[in-house]
Amino acid sequence: MKIRKLAIIISVLCLFGQSLFAQESKAMDYSNASVSIKYYNRSIYYPGMNDDNPIEVHITIKNNGTETLRFKLADDRAFSLDFYAYTVKNSALEMTDTVIEKRTTNRTVYFREISLEGGEEYSFIENVKDYIKVDEPSVYYLEMSFYPELYKSKYIKLNSNRLTLEIRPSTSAASSTYVPVKDTTSEILKPEEIAPDKVVEQTIIARQKSLWDQYFLYMDVESLLKRNSALSKKYVTVSAQERAKMIESFKADLMQSRIENDIIAVPERFQIEKTTYTPTEGTVVVIEWFKYPNFSEKKRYTYKVRQREGIWTIYDYTVVNLGTE
């Protein structure tokens, strides 16, 4: 009789343990959860200057299922997520010393448990520069991992979508202030239906001011890339994803003055000489002066433009040297 009772007790304990295990397994299922990131008040970003020039990202955790989703969120978000930034050559930026110190020092991690019903979302904002060292101007691919059971269980994670992050060379204008994409708002720039000569004029002025977002606004970078025969041959053979990477890499090389030096040269002054165009194609001829220590160089640029859906873009150019002054 005692043996029978003991067997019953063991069976009950086993069933209870299995029930707990099933509940725990269920709680660990994050297959219906997703994490997405997007820029918050997108601006012009520069190396360093964490407080004056933050890279703020809006993070959203969503329950795509029908059952309640529960996860932990640390008060210090360094124990809940990681940011990663990769170059076009797939090398990653280093983690900040602050994050490393936090995770390697014994400390109490305070957190709260958040519950989301089906279709609900939870969002917050973080500064990427608090997590990774952004010391060099370049074009990066930004991603994030979220740890729903905190960093101690980092093998359980949700990965976000990928963003393109453009870090510009530091300028005097950036040394003391946060510079939005537009002077008066944080709205992302969009091309406008302006005349071909205005397109060229705005592009040259943007280059004079090192405003790369505005410089590329009316630039058909893909067509410029195809001017290079070696790049063009590779471009037509790779996937759409690889093409996007090639374009971003090409833009980064332009910003670093590694290629196409004529198109990114900075004139001291310029004068639009002639503009001709049909409804779809056109040329804008510009005289540009480049100042050197002992002389000025004069060049004639002919910008080729074309119109698609009301927007004119620069897709090719030629340069003729006109001597020195």
Image (cartoon, grey):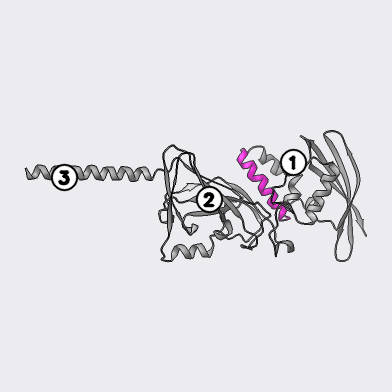
Q: Amino acid at mark 2?
A: Met
Question: Residue 235 or 186: which is nearer the viewer?
Answer: 186
Viewer-nearest residue: 86 or 51: 51
Secondary structure category for the residue under label 2: strand
Viewer-side label of 2, 3? 3
Quadrant of image for the N terminus: top left
How many labels sit on residues?
3
Q: Position of residue 295 (x, y in %)?
A: 89, 63
| Residue 45 % position (x, y) | 66, 56
Mark 3, secondary structure of its residue: helix
Magenta extent: 240-257
Which marked residue is nearer to the observer: mark 1 or mark 3?
3
Q: Residues within 10 Å of mark 3 (few under 14, many from 20)?
A: few
Residue that protrudes farthest toward the top in the picture: 279
CA gap, disc 2 and disc 3: 48 Å
Q: Give the residue at mark 3.
A: 9
- Say whether disc 2 or disc 1 marks the residue closer to the N-terminus: 2
Residue depicted at x 80% and y 37%: 306
- Work out whether mark 2 precedes mark 3 in sequence or the reverse, and give the earlier one: 3
Q: Name the residue rendered at 43%, 49% in the picture.
A: 71
In which quadrant of the rendered view does residue 323 lie?
A: bottom right
| Residue picked out by circle 1 | 223
Q: CA distance from mark 1 to mark 3?
A: 76 Å
Q: Residues within 10 Å of mark 2 (few under 14, many from 20)?
A: many
As drawn, which residue projects farthest toward the left? 1
237 vs 272, left or right, is left
Residue 121 lies in magenta, yes or no?
no
Residue type, numbered disc 3 = Ile
Residue 144 tag number:
2
| Label 1 element class | helix
The secondary structure that dominates the magenta segment is helix
